[in-house]
Image: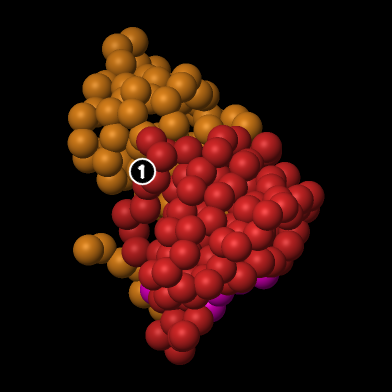
Chain colours: A red, B orange
Amino acid sequence: MSQLKNATIVKAANIYYDGQVTSRTVIQEDGSKVTLGIMLPGTYEFGTDGPEIMEIVSGQLKVLLPGADTWQEINGSATFHVPARSKFALEVFSVTDYCCSYPAE
Amino acid sequence: MSQLKNATIVKAANIYYDGQVTSRTVIQEDGSKVTLGIMLPGTYEFGTDGPEIMEIVSGQLKVLLPGADTWQEINGSATFHVPARSKFALEVFSVTDYCCSYPAE
């Protein structure tokens, strides 16, 4: 089972869309941040400041990335990249567990 | 903002009640476990193996502890103890953020 070691976790959750999307912020040993989150079924749009790497640990969803004209379907696990200062849309069909990381630009 | 430091976090979420209750397992530096969780509005029943200390970080809910004949109302933050090998019921009215710890018996 994958684990994040020697990390700091912020106790209070991040809550979006009335709790349909929630996450916990984790600062890793090297200072980099990840958020571990849950998305319940629904339709969402998120914006980025810097680039993001979304690792879907488990779930069924589709994603519309900025500039794309077709939705990417995910069943199970997958990773997608979102550019800085952009918006992406998600349609989530089953409880989705994710790990989002924030690489330097 | 309260943080748990030098911790190991299990990447995959714990998912209950179709995702209406989810949590992340955190192993603290001293080896003790806590789970950081979210409960969405709904009615739930949970059982314990060992004793549990539930810290409600934020939320509106009521709790029926084992042996109690009245519900305890919580608005905001609160802590309650649940004995080992027992069941407790929760009626959650707003998104509730919690930290559950598992002291030795």
**Residue sitting at 69 percent across and 66 percent down?**
A79
Residue A104, percent from left and from top: 46, 85
Of residue B61 and residue A18, the one placed in the foreground of this image is A18
Seen in the picture, residue A73 relative to A7 is either above or below; the reply is above
Q: Residue furthest top?
A: B69
Badge 1: how crowded within 10 Å, few (<14), some, or many (20+)?
many
Q: Give the extent of the magenta segment.
A: A2-8
Q: Is residue A23 left or right of A62 when viewed as pictured?
A: left
Residue B36, percent from left and from top: 43, 52
**In this figure, which residue is indicated by the disc labeled 1?**
B97
Seen in the picture, residue A7 relative to B3 is either above or below; the reply is below
Question: To which quarter of the image does residue B63 belong?
Answer: top left
Of residue B86 and residue B96, the one placed in the foreground of this image is B96
**Residue sitting at 37 percent across and 52 percent down?**
A13
Seen in the picture, residue B27 relative to A32 is either above or below; the reply is above
Q: Quadrant of the N terminus of chain A?
A: bottom right
**Residue sitting at 33 percent across and 10 percent down?**
B69
Is B54 a magenta residue?
Answer: no
The chain letter for the residue carrying disc 1 is: B
Of residue A94 and residue B89, the one placed in the foreground of this image is A94
Question: How many numbered marks have been drawn onto this rendered protein structure?
Answer: 1
The amino acid pointed to by label 1 is: Asp
Seen in the picture, residue B33 relative to A28 is either above or below; the reply is above
Of residue A102 and residue B20, the one placed in the foreground of this image is A102
**Residue sitting at 63 percent across and 41 percent down?**
A92
Secondary structure, mark 1, is strand
Is A6 a magenta residue?
Answer: yes
